[in-house]
Image (cartoon, rainbow, N blue to C red):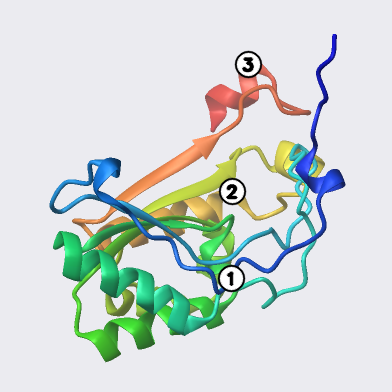
Amino acid sequence: QGMKLVTCDRDYKDINLGDIPVEYIENDFIGREEVFPIEISRGCIFHCHFCSFAHLGKKPGTYIRPKECIKKDIVDRYQKYNTTKFLFVDDTFNDSIEKMQIIKDIRDETGIPFEFWSYARLDLLRAKPEMVDMIDQIGWTSFSFGVETFNKSSGSAVGKGANPEKLKEFLINLRNRFPTHQFHVNLILGLPEDTEESILET
C-alpha cells in the first residue's frame, strides 16, 4: 500500500548511454587486477521462444557502444588497476563480426594484452570460420554458450534449430584448437519434446 511499481522499459524514455563512461571511486574498494565488466552492446537480435527479455529482435549492428568509449574504459582500468581481464557484458557478443573487429582494433591500438569472457552463440561461431580465426587475436579466452539442448526436436521447438551432432563436433574441434580456453555450455532440461530417453541419448 502506498508503493509504486516502476518498470524502466515502460516508464522511462530511451536514453543513449553508449557514450557515458563508467568510473570507479575509492569507496568502491577496487583491488589491483580486478576483473571488470565492460558493456559492449545492448539487446539481442534473436527471438528464442523461452526468453522473456524485453529487448529482443534488435537489428544486427545496432546498439553497439562506440569503439572509443569501450577503449576508454579498458585503458582506464588497465592504467588505474593494472587489470587485463574483463567480463564483456553483451547478450550475444558474436552476433556480428563488427564487434569482434572493434575489440581487435582496440587491442592493436593500445597494446594492452587483455583477455575477456562473454556469452556467445556456438552455431554462429561454427557458421563463420573468420570469427574462430579472430579468437586469439582479440583475447577471447572464456565462453558461455547458450546451446540449451542437444535434442534436435527440442531445439526446433524453441527456436534453436542447429544440428546437435554438428555442434558437438565443432565444440570438440574448438577444445582441440584452444586447449587452454574455458568453455561453458548452458543447457535447459525439460524443454518441449524432451523425455528421459532422449536426454540420456544425447
Which amino acid type corresponds to the residue marked 1 in the rendered image? Answer: Gly
Residue 96, position as x, y percentages in the image? 59, 75
Label 3 element class = helix
Residue 43, position as x, y percentages in the image? 68, 59
Q: Give the Cα distance between marks 1 and 3.
A: 45 Å
Residue 127, position as x, y percentages in the image? 57, 72
Q: Nearer the viewer, residue 53 or 123?
A: 53
Q: Which residue is mark 3?
A: 196
Q: Give the Cα distance between marks 2 and 3.
A: 17 Å
Q: Is residue 13 above or below residue 164?
A: below
Q: Which circle marks residue 164 in the picture? A: 2
Tag 3: Cα neighbours inside 10 Å, few (<14), some, or many (≥20)?
Answer: few
Q: Nearer the viewer, residue 112 or 152?
A: 112
For image coordinates 51% across by 77% down, the residue present is: 99
Tag 2: Cα neighbours inside 10 Å, few (<14), some, or many (≥20)?
Answer: some
Label 1 element class = loop
Which amino acid type corresponds to the residue marked 2 in the rendered image? Answer: Pro
Q: Which residue is mark 1?
A: 18
For image coordinates 26% across by 64% down, the residue present is: 77
Left or right, 41 with respect to 183, comes to right
Residues under numbered marks 2 and 3 in contact, where contact means CB atoms less than 8 Å apart:
no
Q: Is residue 136 above or below residue 15?
A: below
